[in-house]
Image (spheres, rainbow, N blue to C red):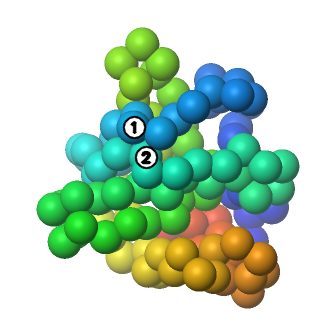
Amino acid sequence: MNEHIWGYQPSSGYSTGIDLIGYKVEATDGGIGKVDKHSDEVGSAYLVVDTGVWIFGKHVLIPAGTVRRIDTESRTIHVDRTKAQIKDAPEFDKDKHIGDAGYHDRIGGYYGDGRV
C-alpha cells in the first residue's frame, strides 16, 4: 500500500491551517462536489467530499495523498483520480472513519495500491 496516501504531497500547495471547507473538488475528468470536512492530521489527512446529486448526495472520503493541486484563488482542489474511480470507492462511513484502522486501510488500499 502507498504509505503516503494519508498525507498531502509537498507539490500540492497545501499549507497547514488552510480551511478547505467549501472548496470545489475536481477529478481528472470533471467536478465531483465540494469539501464538507477535512483533516490535516499527520498520517491521517483526508477530504470528505459532498458529491451532491452527482452520486445521489453521498459523501466520499478521499485521502490527502490524491490531491494534486490546491488553487486557493479559485477555491478548487484537483485530485489525481477520475470521477469513476471516486464513484467506485468504498462508501464513506462517518462512524468508522475516525479511529477504525481497518476502515482507513481499506480506503487507503483502494486509492493507493495501484488498482485505481
Horizontal and vertical percent position of residue 111: 57, 66
Amino acid type for the residue under numbered disc 2: Val
Q: Which residue is labeled 1 in the image?
A: 22
Q: Residue at x 59, y 81 (%)?
A: 95
Image quadrant where residue 4 sits:
bottom right
Is disc 1 placed on a helix, strand or loop? loop
Q: Is residue 74 left or right of residue 30?
A: right
Q: Dot 2, how many residues are within 10 Å of its Cα: few (below 14), some (14-19), or many (20+)?
A: many
Horizontal and vertical percent position of residue 29: 26, 46
Q: Residue at x 29, y 51 (%)?
A: 32
Amino acid type for the residue under numbered disc 1: Gly
Q: Residue at x 38, y 66 (%)?
A: 59
Image quadrant where residue 88 sits:
bottom left
Whether residues under marks 1 and 2 lie with C-beta atoms below 8 angstroms apart, the answer is yes
Give the answer, above or below, for where 38 lies relative to 106: above
Image quadrant where residue 98 sits:
bottom right
How far apart are labels 1 and 2 at the CA level? 5 Å
Give the answer, above or below, for where 43 lies relative to 70: below
Q: Residue at x 80, y 61 (%)?
A: 3
